[in-house]
Amino acid sequence: MKKIAVFASGNGSNLQALIDAIKLGALQAEIVLVVSDRPNAYCLTRASEAGIPTFAFRAKDYENKEHYESVIKNNLEALGVQYLILAGYMRLIGTVLLESYPEKIINIHPSLLPLFPGKDGIGQALEAGVTETGVTIHYVDEGMDTGPIIAQEIIALDENETRSSLEEKVHAVEHRLYPKVLRHIFESEEK
Ligand code: GRF
């Protein structure tokens, strides 16, 4: 059973999808910590309601990224965390965590990378007027949404697609794809 930490900054619907998949037995993992850089984010409420310990911090309370990542790292190590799962975490991961968890940090992004990296992948796709976009799950490196791609799923845009209709489609794909892909990764490691 893999011990994972989920990193999130906002609503946490992807966190919820992982919590639900674990509960249903569709993902063999234990979320031992939820980390958030926004102490008021709803993802922390979701974690508490599921009985998952949380670590919330404000970057500005620390000297720099190395400083807060070292504190996070101590928490992760104390809990025996094996994988860091980013789910709407709005900060770049720095060298402290990258070096401690090589190839063990995974992110989900709402576009077909390398298209539309960074903030608001959904808005960028709408703005560009593409006929299809999608969801990407990838390993995290030092860049912004640049690491090796693990899985992608294409989503077709309708002619009268709106932001809210596209958001709904993207989230539905994310919530299904993330637990499934993580399950494959964790299972293949057990063999
Ligand atoms: C998702 O669209 C994810 O792909 C992106 O941020 C969003 C987070 O949504 N990285 P939520 O907080 O999981 O609801």
Image: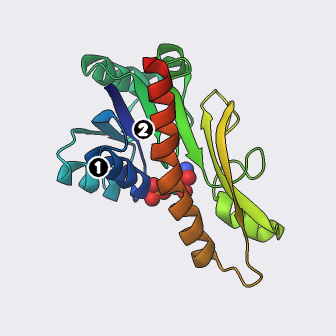
Q: Which residue is mark 1?
A: 24
The secondary structure type at the circle numbered 1 is loop
Residue 57 in view here: no
Name the secondary structure under disc 2: helix
Which residue occupies 73% across, 46% down? 113
Q: Amino acid at mark 1?
A: Leu
* Residue 29 versus residue 25 in the image, above or below: above
Q: Left or right: where does residue 68 sit relative to residue 168? A: left
Compute the Cα span from label 2 to label 1. 35 Å
Which is more toward the observer, 154 or 138? Answer: 154
Residue visible at 68% across and 66% down in the picture:
123
Give the x, y percent position of residue 180: 49, 44
The yes-or-no answer for disc 1 within 8 Å of ligand 1 is no
Query: Residue 186 — which label?
Result: none
Residue 15 percent location from the top left of the image: 38, 50
Residue positioned 52% across, 40% down in the render: 181
Quadrant of residue 163 in the image?
A: bottom right
State the image coordinates of residue 111 (x, y, percent, origin top left): 68, 54
Three-letter amino acid code of the residue under disc 2: Ala
**Residue 122 picture location, percent across and down:** 66, 63
